[in-house]
Image (spheres, rainbow, N blue to C red):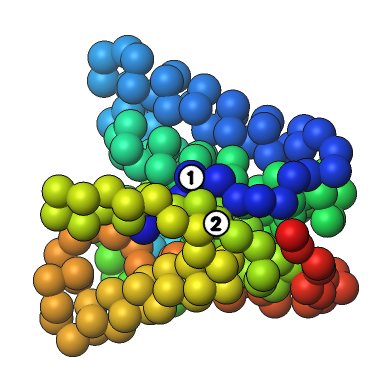
Amino acid sequence: MIPLKDNIPAQRLSVVNTALIVLNLGVFLYVFIGSGREASIFLHYSLIPARVTGAAVAAHLPFMKRMIPFVTHMFLHGGWLHVLGNMWSLWIFGDNVEDHLGHLRYFVFYLLCGVGAACMHVLLNLGSRIPTVGASGAVAGVMGAYLVLYPRARVLTLLPFLVFFPIVEIPAFFFLGAWFVIQFVNAFSGFLGGAQALAGIAWWAHVGGFVTGIVLLSLLGGRARRSH
């Protein structure tokens, strides 16, 4: 399912959401336009669970160097499809969540969703030395908040099916609920040694970000709002 747009217009300019999209795209261009730059940046700023949990590694790294990747990893991406997919979802769902929270609270909310997603990933991959990058966890938090705020919104969706590409309107609660179930099933199957375990996707980060977004919104007083 590929979201194309929703039917909830934002009431004010989504300054922070737009800035986050521009920042992510700018960082991506900076990292990948230039020879050899990406290897060094990924080494220092991607999230590597073993650097946080491994006593031998952690002993040689200052505390801040172990903690900074919890934030910096969400502004790095592994390829064009990765960054464009994340930013497209953020563009569709983020403006409405910013509209509800306000600019500053939305910025803090976004960062905390990314950190929450990172914590979930680290806890369930304690010894992993695989670098993790991407805004998916933070974007998942935005999607979780959108589900709570606008469950009856309509999401215009492209449904690729073999050679057919129908476009249909789907209720937000179904679209986002189905998305979450897919993430959870893929994450859980990794524990069972399924093919998803080798897919190189941090499924638990998606789950953690989504749940973090819902919890944070409830703490901030978020509730369902009327939608067209």
Residue under label 2: 155
In the rendered image, residue 183, in percent from the top left (x then y), is placed at 37, 71
Is residue 221 positioned above or below 62 on the image? below
Real-space CA distance between mark 1 and mark 2, rounded to the nearest whole angstrom: 7 Å
Res. 162 in view? yes
Is residue 27 positioned above or below 189 on the image? above
Name the N-terminal-most of marks 1 and 2: 1
Mark 2 element type = strand
Question: Which quadrant of the figure has residue 227?
Answer: bottom right
Res. 135 in view? no
Residue reaching furthest bottom? 192
In the rendered image, residue 123, in percent from the top left (x then y), is placed at 43, 76
Q: Are marks 1 and 2 in contact (CB under 8 Å)?
A: yes
Identity of the residue drawn at 81% across and 49% down: 99
Q: Is residue 218 left or right of residue 39?
A: right
Which of the numbered marks, if any, corresponds to residue 36? none
Mark 1 element type = strand
Identity of the residue drawn at 55% across and 46% down: 5
Question: Callout 1, which amino acid?
Answer: Leu
| Along the viewing direction, whichever of 155 and 101 lies nearer the viewer | 155
Instruction: Locate the C terminus and report the quarter of the image it occupies.
Output: bottom right
Identity of the residue drawn at 68% across and 39% down: 17
Question: Callout 2, which amino acid?
Answer: Val
In the rendered image, residue 196, in percent from the top left (x then y), is placed at 19, 69
Residue under label 1: 4
Instruction: Locate the N terminus and report the quarter of the image it occupies.
Output: bottom left
Identity of the residue drawn at 50% across and 64% down: 170
Q: Is residue 78 left or right of residue 134?
A: left
Is residue 95 positioned above or below 110 on the image? above
In the rendered image, residue 26, in percent from the top left (x then y), is placed at 52, 23
